[in-house]
Image: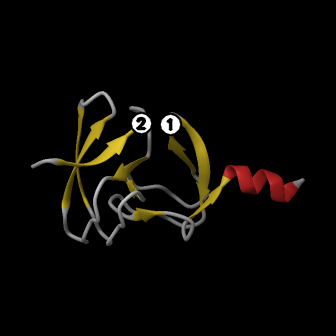
Amino acid sequence: MAHGALMHDSVDDVAVVIHDVTSGDDIKVVTLQGEEFGTVKAVQDIPLGHKIALRDMAEGKEVIKYGRAIGRATQDIAQGAHVHTHNVVSIRWETSIDE
């Protein structure tokens, strides 16, 4: 199985899919260094360049990408789900709205 998603840091909650993904696909995840992370089953269709959840995330949890928080889950997110603006608010925008 060729890899289907790249994760930037070993602590990341998400990886970026490198081709369109269909619900039910087994997605092989590798690090940018080419190390295998494992396989995640997609539970939703995910377009090229979007994020897939590598683990379950509860509503309110900070979402980690690049080894740092990029956003906060606005609802529970299942492993294998599409992670995007419909279920995560950017910390950058959250901060600018509060100011």
Percent across and percent down for residue 67 are 51, 33
Percent across and percent down for residue 16 are 38, 51
Percent across and percent down for residue 70 are 60, 46
Q: Residues within 10 Å of mark 2 (few under 14, many from 20)?
A: some
Indicate which disc residue 15 carries.
Answer: none
Indicate which disc residue 8 carries.
Answer: 2
Sequence-earlier tag: 2 or 1: 2
Mark 1 lies on residue: 66
How many marks overall? Answer: 2
| Residue 54 visible | no
Q: Is residue 85 above or below residue 27?
A: below
Label 2, secondary structure: give it: loop
Q: Is residue 56 left or right of residue 86?
A: left
Label 1, secondary structure: give it: loop
Question: Which residue is depicted at the point 34% across and 33% down?
Answer: 32
| Residue 80 visible | yes
Q: Is residue 86 left or right of residue 82?
A: right
Q: Is residue 56 above or below residue 3?
A: below
Report the amino acid beneath label 2. His
Question: Which residue is depicted at the point 29% across and 65% down?
Answer: 20
Q: Are marks 2 and 1 in contact (CB under 8 Å)?
A: yes
Percent across and percent down for residue 35 are 24, 30
Question: Which residue is depicted at the point 27% across and 64% down?
Answer: 42
Report the amino acid beneath label 1. Tyr
